[in-house]
């Protein structure tokens, strides 16, 4: 399909896309210089210009130091931002670059830098140019990784941006700590990439092309080449997006049930170190998905070793259910939390330091041996 046959994004559509952001004091736009983010900046600038009041717009470009063209692309974004009356800042990811997991680590660095920029201008919303094509790609990527339902829901239009902790280094001044109240907003998530390209073509605005987007070394790039064949079978971007919306609807229902189960089965308030105590009989009667999520939520609350991996959580939950059915003892650690099955309760609490865990596991055995000798 030629660009001329694709409808650009209209002013009325843009007004609807940004309408819920009108009362923000400032919006940070993540603009790489590619067609999607350039269209985001163009549409946001024109939307703001049509308003008598509204947020200040600040465009931010991150130079990852991975391509020599990046500096020139950032300069082009700066020139366009000046033309549109938008402030612009170029941020650089300095230091040595990782040899593995480059895209993932570059993405984390990009969000950390942009979040710091948002913090400096007191903006609580960072806008990115993810499209419906990106949504489809994300869901397909997660399917290929064996994701659970949460992953298959795809990207939400708005979500809190919680940066991972960096225990190995003290946070730099101006860098938000994990949990900082910054939101990631994707106003173009229902718009096709082709329409953004058509919008730029109609406005006679150029954009950069990042060759890493088609680099076969990266999984997402390889999956991207499958899009035409999948679309021919009916699995186009809108189908994947529809799947995401339906899974998000189911997710909301499941999370409601998990919250209700937590309230019904918990003894007392949940603290960050625990213990969190759940009534064992009621827990065993829960639907498997609700029980799994309730257990995962408790482990995540008191544990201190990072995210709870779904596969490991499923294994622990299966073993816990088997022990409960057999009336056997159960005590297991996961993600910095220890789960213990008692006669009528399940206790989740902070695990001891790793050096003390062997002693914790062997203590019941030593007590049993002493009992036999007595």
Image (cartoon, rainbow, N blue to C red):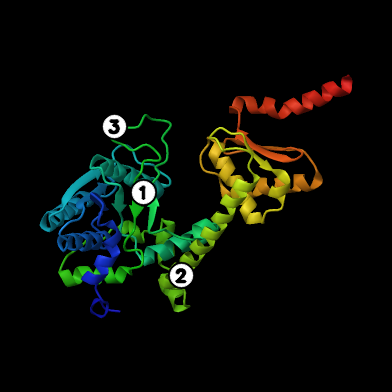
Give the distance between the C-alpha atoms of the residues marked 1 and 2, in whole angstroms: 26 Å
Marks 3, 1: nearer the viewer:
3
Quickly name the residue at label 3. 173
Q: Position of residue 46 (x, y in %)?
A: 17, 63
Q: Return the residue found at the far top.
A: 374
Q: In the rendered structure, are the residues bearing label 3 and label 1 in contact, judged by CB atoms less than 8 Å apart? A: no
Could you tell whether 209 is left or right of 218 in the image? Answer: left
Residue sitting at 78 percent across and 27 percent down?
365
Give the distance between the C-alpha atoms of the residues marked 3 and 1, in whole angstroms: 20 Å
Residue sitting at 73 percent across and 25 percent down?
363
Q: Position of residue 238 (x, y in %)?
A: 42, 72
Residue sitting at 56 percent across and 36 percent down?
302
Q: What secondary structure is found at the residue carrying circle 3?
A: loop
Q: What secondary structure is found at the residue carrying circle 2?
A: helix
Which quadrant holds residue 287? bottom right
Name the N-terminal-most of marks 3 and 2: 3
- Give the quarter of the figure containing the N terminus: bottom left
Above or below, 1 against 210 in this view is below
Name the N-terminal-most of marks 1 and 2: 1
Residue sitting nearer the eye, 179 or 29: 179
Q: What secondary structure is found at the residue carrying circle 1?
A: helix
Question: Dot 2: within a 10 Å radius of its alpha carbon, few (fewer than 14), some, or many (20 or more) residues?
Answer: few
Residue sitting nearer the eye, 74 or 13: 13
Quickly name the residue at label 1. 107
Question: Dot 3: within a 10 Å radius of its alpha carbon, few (fewer than 14), some, or many (20 or more) residues?
Answer: few
Could you tell whether 292 is left or right of 151 in the image? Answer: right
Quickly name the residue at label 2. 242
Residue sitting at 37 percent across and 29 percent down?
170
Give the distance between the C-alpha atoms of the residues marked 3 and 2, in whole angstroms: 42 Å
Examine the rendering and report whether any part of residue 256 can be seen. yes
Examine the rendering and report whether any part of residue 144 can be seen. no
Above or below, 296 against 54 in this view is above
């Amino acid at each position: 399909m030629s660009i001329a046959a694709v409808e650009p994004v209209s002013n009325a559509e843009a007004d609807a896309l940004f309408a819920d952001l009108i009362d923000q004091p400032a919006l940070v736009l993540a603009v790489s210089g590619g067609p999607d983010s350039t269209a985001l900046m163009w549409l946001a600038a024109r939307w703001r210009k049509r308003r008598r009041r509204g947020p200040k717009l600040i465009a931010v470009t991150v130079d990852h130091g991975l391509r020599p063209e990046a500096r020139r692309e950032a300069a082009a974004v700066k020139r366009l931002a000046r033309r549109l009356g938008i402030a612009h800042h170029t941020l650089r990811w300095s230091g040595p670059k990782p040899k593995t997991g480059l895209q993932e680590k570059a993405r984390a660095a990009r969000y950390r830098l942009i979040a710091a920029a948002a913090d400096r201008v007191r903006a609580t919303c960072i806008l990115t140019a993810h499209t419906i094509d990106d949504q489809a790609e994300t869901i397909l990527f997660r399917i290929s990784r064996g994701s659970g339902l949460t992953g298959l829901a795809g990207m939400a239009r708005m979500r809190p941006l919680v940066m991972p902790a960096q225990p190995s280094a003290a946070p730099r001044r101006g860098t938000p700590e994990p949990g900082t109240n910054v939101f990631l907003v994707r106003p173009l998530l229902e718009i096709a990439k082709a329409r953004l390209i058509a919008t730029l073509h109609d406005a006679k605005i150029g954009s950069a092309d990042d060759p890493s987007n088609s680099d076969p070394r990266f999984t997402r790039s390889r999956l991207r080449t499958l899009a035409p064949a999948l679309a021919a079978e009916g699995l186009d971007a809108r189908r994947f997006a529809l799947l995401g919306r339906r899974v998000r609807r189911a997710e909301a229902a499941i999370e409601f049930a998990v919250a209700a189960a937590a309230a019904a089965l918990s003894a007392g308030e949940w603290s960050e170190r625990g213990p969190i105590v759940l009534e064992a009989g009621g827990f065993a009667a829960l639907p498997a998905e609700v029980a799994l999520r309730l257990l995962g939520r408790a482990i995540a609350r008191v544990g201190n070793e990072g995210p709870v991996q779904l596969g490991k959580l499923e294994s622990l939950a299966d073993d816990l259910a088997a022990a409960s059915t057999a009336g056997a003892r159960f005590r297991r650690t996961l993600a910095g939390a220890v789960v213990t099955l008692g006669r009528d309760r399940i206790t989740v609490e902070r695990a001891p330091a790793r050096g003390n865990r062997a002693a914790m596991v062997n203590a019941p055995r030593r007590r049993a041996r002493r009992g036999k000798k007595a």
